[in-house]
Image (cartoon, rainbow, N blue to C red):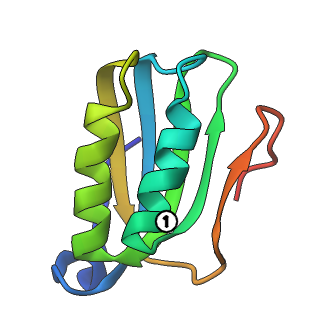
Amino acid sequence: MSEETSPEAADTGAFARLEARVTGRVQGVGYRYFVLDRAAALDVDGWVANEPDGSVRCVVEGDRRSLERFLAQLREGPRGARVERVDEAWLAPTHSLSGFTVRSGAHPGD
């Protein structure tokens, strides 16, 4: 994922979109439900899913400050996880997400 920043996302208080891919020991350790819990606490919309390569992918929209806190928590993960890397991309929001869901590994994307 390349890091792209729209003018709106550059403002720390703006509504933004974060797409993140988390690698390491992040499947089979409750990582997606950890993400679901953090998303609810930060009131952001989006989804999280396991990927076939063993990574976890998140697509989230919300206030830029909330998304920065969310990203920091992705880097921590739940007990039992070992986060090796988080690739992030900041994009202009699409305003197409509502609520936060855990998707299956066969998700169609966004």
Amino acid bearing label 1: Ala
What residue is rendered at 42% in x and 55% in y? 38
What residue is rendered at 64% in x and 73% in y? 99
Expressed as whole percent of the image width and height from the top left, the position of residue 34 reads 48, 41
* 48 vs 3, nearest the viewer: 48
Which residue in the structure is indicated by mark 1?
40
* 64 vs 42, nearest the viewer: 42
Q: In the figure, residue 77 lies in which quadrant?
A: top left
100 left or right of 38 in image: right
51 left or right of 5 in image: right
Q: How many labels does the image show?
A: 1
User: Tag 1's secondary structure?
Assistant: helix
Above-or-below relation of 9 to 21: below
Above-or-below relation of 13 to 30: below
* 86 vs 80, nearest the viewer: 80
Q: In the figure, residue 52 lies in which quadrant?
A: top right
What residue is rendered at 34% in x and 41% in y? 74
* 53 vs 68, nearest the viewer: 68
Expressed as whole percent of the image width and height from the top left, the position of residue 5 reads 28, 67
Above-or-below relation of 10 to 26: below
Above-or-below relation of 72 to 84: below
Which quadrant of the rendered structure holds the C terminus?
bottom right
- Give the class, few, some or many, for how many residues have Cα within 10 Å of label 1's Cα (few <14, many ≥20): few
Which quadrant of the rendered structure holds the N terminus?
top left
103 left or right of 9 in image: right
Expressed as whole percent of the image width and height from the top left, the position of residue 50 reads 65, 30
What residue is rendered at 20% in x and 86% in y? 13
